[in-house]
Amino acid sequence: MNVLVCVKRVPATAGQITLTADAQDIDTRYLGFTISPHEECAVEEAVRMIEAHGGSTTVLTLGPEAATDQLRDAMALGIERAILLQSDGREWDPVATASAIVEAIEAEGAAGRSYDLVLFGNESADSAGYQVGVRVADALDLPCATGIKAIELSDGRATVRRQTESGWESAELALPAVVTVKEGLNLPRYPSLPGRLKAKKKEVERITPQWRDGGLEKVRLKLPVQAEHTVEILGKNGDAGAQLVEVFQRLRLL
Amino acid sequence: MVLAFIEHVAGAPTMLSLEVLTMANRLAGEMGTQLEAIAIGPNAAAATGILSSYGVSTLHVADDGRLADYAPAAWAHAIAELVREVDPDVVIGTASDRGGEVMAHVATRMKLPMAANCTEIAPGDPFTVIRQRWGGSLLEEAHLKGTIKLLTLAPHALTAAASPSRTEVTTHAFSPALDDKDFRVRLQPQVEVDTGKISLAQARVVVGGGRGVGSAEGFAALEELAGLLGGAVGCSRAVTSLGWRPHSDQVGQTGTRIAPDLYIACGISGAIQHMVGCRAAKHILAINTDAGAPIVAQADYAVIGDVQKVLAAVNAEVRRVKAGEPSRSPA
Ligand SMILES: Cc1cc2nc3c(=O)[nH]c(=O)nc-3n(C[C@H](O)[C@H](O)[C@H](O)COP(=O)(O)OP(=O)(O)OC[C@H]3O[C@@H](n4cnc5c(N)ncnc54)[C@H](O)[C@@H]3O)c2cc1C
Ligand SMILES: Nc1ncnc2c1ncn2[C@@H]1O[C@H](COP(=O)(O)O)[C@@H](O)[C@H]1O
């Protein structure tokens, strides 16, 4: 069982977002970076699969040199190999991202490394294109399920389940396949200290794909307009009980 | 021509599809062209009645029994085949679980870019869209290239509105040349046991807890208040990551979107990824030790203090009132 996980480096924004002066990016001067929560679950799932079924795991990202941090985070959790598709820091749109990933998977195949399962997040946290996994699956002619919150493997098949607006759905996929996952799939472990130290020493393989224009061109970012707003302070600690009851009654909840 | 991909249940378009039709109708008007629709699955043709109030001239129905099940690649195959035949200027679908997935498959089949979760569309050259990033806490203005513009509309970007005039809707059934390969993935609905619990997404009151609740056991007071008010308990991602609550309770960008009349956020700081999950709440009440926490500035009501102390007092007061005793008048 060989599993590939595709992750993306994104800023860990917190209380509010600030944009750079040219409105092309989030101002990340005071921010850390992380991988999207959906993809953290994909990493955890890959590690569990290999613990249960044996095999190998690889993590891949398209991003700047600094994205090796996120690859090492994944290796600290138990992923064995890491591939960086090194970009010059510009944002690649979904078409361009998917085609670079497809080329990398094909190059892996040519080098005798084929994958039974390629895991993606359902959508990236930052640009949220909702399509890279589907595009990779179609380009490689692999069956694909999206938005998955449970995966079971047996006899070369994956049984997957997802939760939609109208309830739970399930499907069976013959491997090799592409699955895009959502947070809730599992509860990712925290990296151990030995895991971190081991990951630090590991090599990251690098490929530099050619920049391409995929056809969805960012012009600028903007923050949604927030309505003017006032807050009514109802009290402190234990003295607010009666005021809150009044609010509940006003809103007809009591 | 603008082509709208409609999702429906036995011919009744979903709310998100009515929003898509409203946007598509407006767009067709601006572009001086007509609006057509495609619907797949059992009883699709029954949608004509409603579509006539949304300016649709033709409803295309993919005629193949195998499409009764939801097979994303097969549905996309049918749409792509129609797109090649009728050559629309724009194809627009919903950004639902199905809509987004099918449109992405259509995009690869047509070798076209696609813009997901658009909130505004300005046709012309360049064709410009505003789309959501970060679950809607950030917007992007983008140019969408490609001979045919493929996009999905963000949920609730506008209000669905039928037009007072009705159109004559022609039904066009077509039989796509489906491939067995398109049916490799079929999604089957699963029978669910009704737990009798009020669902987070539907609840009128949600009592949400964050790291400030202190422990898994600390949620007992939140459970009690939710029970008293007939609501549901939610939580932040910090809480799910700590293993205090299941992910199904998580509110936010990577959790559930809620729309209650009142959201009571206890010991939650109000990170943007949490706030996108509760921005449809009509009122927010924050309980937090820190008057400077972002959640307080975004709330309608706030109580500054320790969650457990505040909730102990509130729960006692609500119990008194429910038992028919007079509320203590505010001090
Ligand atoms: C891509 C991405 C997606 C994310 N998706 C989500 C998501 O879906 N949902 C989500 O919630 N988060 C999400 N997050 C995480 C988010 O950024 C925050 O880290 C998280 O919401 C913080 O949770 P919190 O408010 O419980 O904890 P904290 O930020 O630690 O806040 C705790 C709050 O409790 C208060 N407090 C402490 N003690 C007490 C007390 N005794 N009584 C009262 N108040 C007290 C503090 O003043 C503080 O305001 C996401 C992050 C990323 C990067
Ligand atoms: N730059 C990238 N490098 C590696 N994987 C990516 C990248 N961008 C997107 N992905 C993967 O594709 C998924 C969907 O991305 P998107 O289509 O942008 O929403 C993400 O959750 C990742 O798993």
Image (spheres, coloured by chain):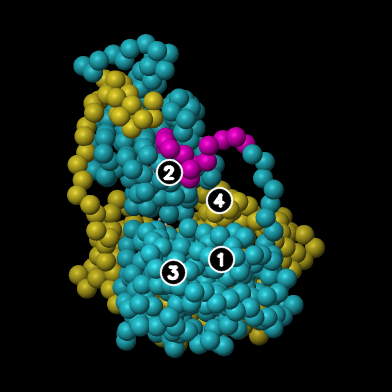
B328 relative to B222, above or below: above
Image quadrant in which you'd find residue B184: bottom right
Q: Which residues are magenta?
A: B195-208
Q: Which residue is mark 2?
A: B236
Q: Which residue is mark 3?
A: B166
Q: Which mark is residue B47?
A: 1
Q: Which mark is residue A184?
A: 4
Q: Is residue A85 magenta?
A: no
- The chain letter corresponding to yellow is A
Where disc 2 sits, the SS reads loop
* Circle nearer the viewer, 4 or 1: 1
Q: Amino acid at mark 2?
A: Ser
Residue drawn at (38%, 64%) of the image = B164
- The chain letter corresponding to cyan is B
Say if disc 2 is inside 8 Å of ligand 1: yes
Say if disc 1 is inside 8 Å of ligand 2: no
Q: Mark 2 to mark 4: distance in Å?
A: 13 Å
Q: Amino acid at mark 1?
A: Ala
Q: Amino acid at mark 4?
A: Gly
Q: Mark 2 to mark 3: distance in Å?
A: 46 Å
In the rendered image, residue B161, in percent from the top left (x then y), is placed at 39, 61
- Left or right of B322: which side holds A142? right
- The prevailing secondary structure element of the residues shown in magenta is loop
Same subunit, tags 2 and 4:
no
